[in-house]
Amino acid sequence: MEERKVLFSAIQPSGILTIGNYLGALRNFKKLQNDYDSIFSVADLHTLTVRQDPAVLRKNVYELAALYLACGIDPQKSILFVQSHVSAHAELTWILNTICYPGELSRMTQFKEKSKSHEDNINMGLMDYPVLMASDILLYQTDIVPVGADQKQHLELSRDIAIRFNNRFGDVFKVPDGYIPKTAARVMSLQEPSKKMSKSDANFNAFISMDDDPDTVRRKFKRAVTDSDNRIIFSEDKPGISNLLTIYSAVCDKTIEDAEKEFENCGYGDFKSKVGDAVAAVIEPIRQEKNKLLASKDYLDYVLKDGAYKAEKIAYKTLFKVYKKVGLVPRKR
């Protein structure tokens, strides 16, 4: 029997996720866990690169863990854990820092962008973020990493670090490949369809939160920006309508062409109402399941404790190989 490949993915608990995060990542995880040995992490250490309210961060960790489960992650099939619960992540980061160079880290696009938006807190963690991300991935001998466009550069660095370490000390790490789902939808802002949907948008009508109730979802879609034309077609000249068609086709598992045909003789008002109904029908069961899980923190704690135990066993197997390769004396057990 062929050994299954390992898939690793981590999401920061930096606030409630949007329908864009769901369609681009979380929805796919439920399917992928059947095909890969899947490891999912709540990346709490990564959030510390910007200032956090400790109480809010703790709340967000539970919120994201519950959302993972509500979206279909099965603890019997996959490993779900909190990054800071497995200290090997921080330990490997130190080792990998010794083969990384300031120049390559300072050239990272995300570091440049975050440095501009957080000028009062340009810390070493912000620069070192990609090395911690490399540790996250390499610890688990990962084959596949689902990755969005904004993380491609970091994944390339992870690959470079793995190759550099293996060349210098001998083979330890698998060199991971990126995975971009064919069905991943790029979801744009409902108010400014030229830019990506973001949960940090100051305009709450611009994004659909996975915590939005059905009435809120429908109201936001009714207010979505369209254009002065009355045709419902996918076109570069119609970014608002194209975005709504993308969302509708994704949540209904239809092609854009089929969605266009469905709304061929439909007005904008009815079209936006039907998109809102379709999205609400997908989000609401997830929202209710998530709230049910959050009402029982004991179960969440059990899942995260068990996940950390399983993750730790894999991670420390890799870390001990690294320590031996670089010449550190292993601790006797």
Image: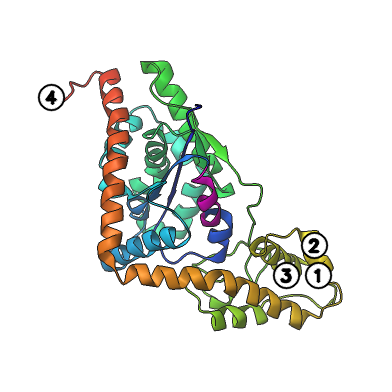
Pick whichever of labels 4 and 2 is earlier in the sequence.
2
Q: Which mark is residue 258?
A: 2
Please state the extent of the stretch shown in magenta in the rendering: 26-34
The local secondary structure at tag 3 comes to helix
- The answer to whether marks 3 and 2 mark residues whose Cβ atoms lie closer than 8 Å is no
Viewer can see residue 271 = yes
Distance from Cα at disc 4 to Cα at disc 2: 63 Å
Residue 130 included in the magenta stretch of the image: no
Point out residue 257 in the picture as x, y percentages from the top left corner: 81, 60
- The answer to whether marks 4 and 2 mark residues whose Cβ atoms lie closer than 8 Å is no
Residue beneath disc 4: 332
Left or right of 161 in this view: 20: right
Residue beneath disc 3: 240
The local secondary structure at tag 1 comes to helix
Distance from Cα at disc 4 to Cα at disc 1: 67 Å
Local packing at callout 3 (Cα closer than 10 Å; few below 14, some 14-19, many 20+) is many
Q: Is residue 1 above or below residue 58?
A: above
Circle 3: residue type: Gly
Circle 1: residue type: Glu
